[in-house]
Amino acid sequence: MHSNLSFEQAPPLSVPYRFFLTAPWFGVAAGLLLAFMGEDMLASRWTPAALAGTHLLVAGFMLQAMCGALLQFVPVATGGNIWQPGWVAAWVHPLLIIAVGLLVAAFLTQYPVLFMAASLGFAVALGFYAVVVGVALWRTPAQSATIVALRIALIGLVVTLGLGVTLSLGLAYQTDLPLLALTDVHAAWGLGGWALMLLAGVAYFVVPMFQLTPAYPGWLARGVPLLLLALLLVWSLLPFGYPDGVRQFVLLSGLGTAGLFAGMTLYLQGRRRRKVSDTNLLFFRTAMLSLVALLFSALLFVALPDLGNDPRAPVWLGMLAVVGVFVTSINGMLYKIVPFLNWLHLQRLCGLNSLPPTMNQMIPERIMRRQFYLHLTALACLLVAVWLPILARPAGLIFALACAWLGVNLVSALRVYLRFRNRIRAAA
Ligand code: HEM
């Protein structure tokens, strides 16, 4: 096991689990929304339903899982001391659920008051969360590449939030703000500055640990977050009148940097010490291949402007990024983290008296593998549905099913934990 883990500081299981167990159901909601709305939802990135579906995934599924993971990861992997994690989770978790619900309703109905209420909810929940996690991250004496990436990710979350609130106010009240251009800046900070940065920071730590690969080279681990940050800063200046060529260059450089991280992860996975391909590895590989596909798709769209100017092109890129990279990697990570945390907490309770169930007994490998194939089918159908609209409704349903199955698997793992814990308590 990794030598730098300090489990003494680990928060109670209820802290990360409330976020982990909620996340998949936002995926179910997004899938059902697509099944209900059908092909119109994928016609352009600007349809109200597309914006609502995007935020069910990015501010629902992804944000829940990522906020929960950081509350666990920062104390255990970086030694950062999070103030009252139980209390923070008890407030942030329900507030985020309410805020996402309000934002989705705002996109679908366009009522200004809903945009305002959602912004207030997000500002309170994420503002509080960012202060508490930020204090822990900046106070820790550790200086690894993971810490650098996590600090930038948190800055990315705050910038995304600030721009999201600005956009919401812009939609609620007619303003002179360049909303379309600011949306691109908000999307880049949300997907690149927050989500990808966090994924990279966590991957530097958990890929070698869980998948038994060599460590990421130091130049890459430190270089990728810093380069991405520099590109995001330049991208943020673009709404102020830069030519299209500069825009494309910055976008492709950002995706190239992300592709470098993905290519290195795939290379390291090829050199892992244990050649077994467990389901977590398959999820992570799929996510990294999606990241590489994102780079090649963007190159293709630049090379073939007729195709690149089709309103479906950005939908294709968004689908690859949000479902292909982030939902996929989070799904795989949850299959490692939840059984591992169950096992760890039970082992502490057991002491020397008995053995806890193995990780494979928490969620059997064959069940995870079947859910992986369903998720893969959903991803393929969603991507094809962007160009073949008749597939939109079935793709939405399959995606909802795959997410529901993930949710059920996580609940079963928790039940195994509770059953065993109650047995130990009864015996004691
Ligand atoms: C936290 C993670 C977030 C991520 C990753 C994210 C990502 C995105 C993306 C990718 C888009 C573009 C969607 C498209 O092109 O179809 C977008 C648009 C938008 N986001 Fe977010 N978002 C996040 C949080 C928020 C929050 C907290 C708010 C509000 C408080 C918000 C408000 C908006 C608005 C209003 C738009 C659309 C603007 C328009 O129609 O011009 N977002 N977001």
Image: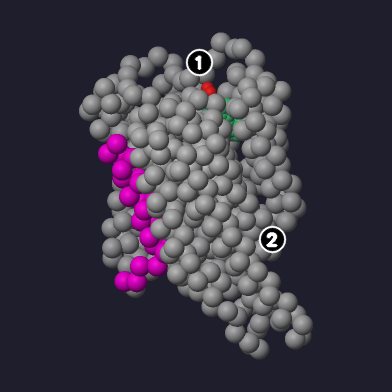
- Residue 159's image quarter? top right
The answer to whether residue 153 is left or right of residue 129 is: left
Residue ID at (56%, 63%): 409
Q: Report which quarter residue 59 is drawn in.
A: top right
Residue that numbered label 2 is attached to = 14
Question: Assess mark 2: CB under 8 A from ligand 1?
Answer: no
Outermost residue on the left side: it is 303
280, above or below 44, in the image? below
* The quarter of the displayed image where residue 162 is located: top right
Most foreground residue, 311 or 276: 311
Image quadrant occupied by the C terminus: bottom right
What colour scheme does the image use?
one colour
Residue at coordinates 56% horizontally, 32% vertically from top-left?
A: 52
Instruction: Give the farthest residue toward the bottom.
Output: 353
**Could you tell whether 368 is left or right of 347 in the image?**
left
As drawn, 238 above or below 203: above
Q: Magenta-highlighted stretch: main secondary structure?
A: helix
How far across and down, in percent of the image, does residue 84 sit?
Answer: 73, 55
Is 141 magenta? The answer is: no
Q: Position of residue 316 (x, y in %)?
A: 37, 35
Report the residue at 51% width, 39% height from top: 35
The magenta span reads 275-297
Q: Which residue is mark 1?
A: 178
Separation of residues labelled 1 and 2 (CA atoms): 42 Å
Secondary structure under the numbered disc 2 in the rendered image: helix
Query: Is residue 87 visible in this depiction of the protein?
Result: yes
- Mark 2 surroundings within 10 Å by alpha-carbon count, few (fewer than 14), some (14 through 19), many (20 or more): some
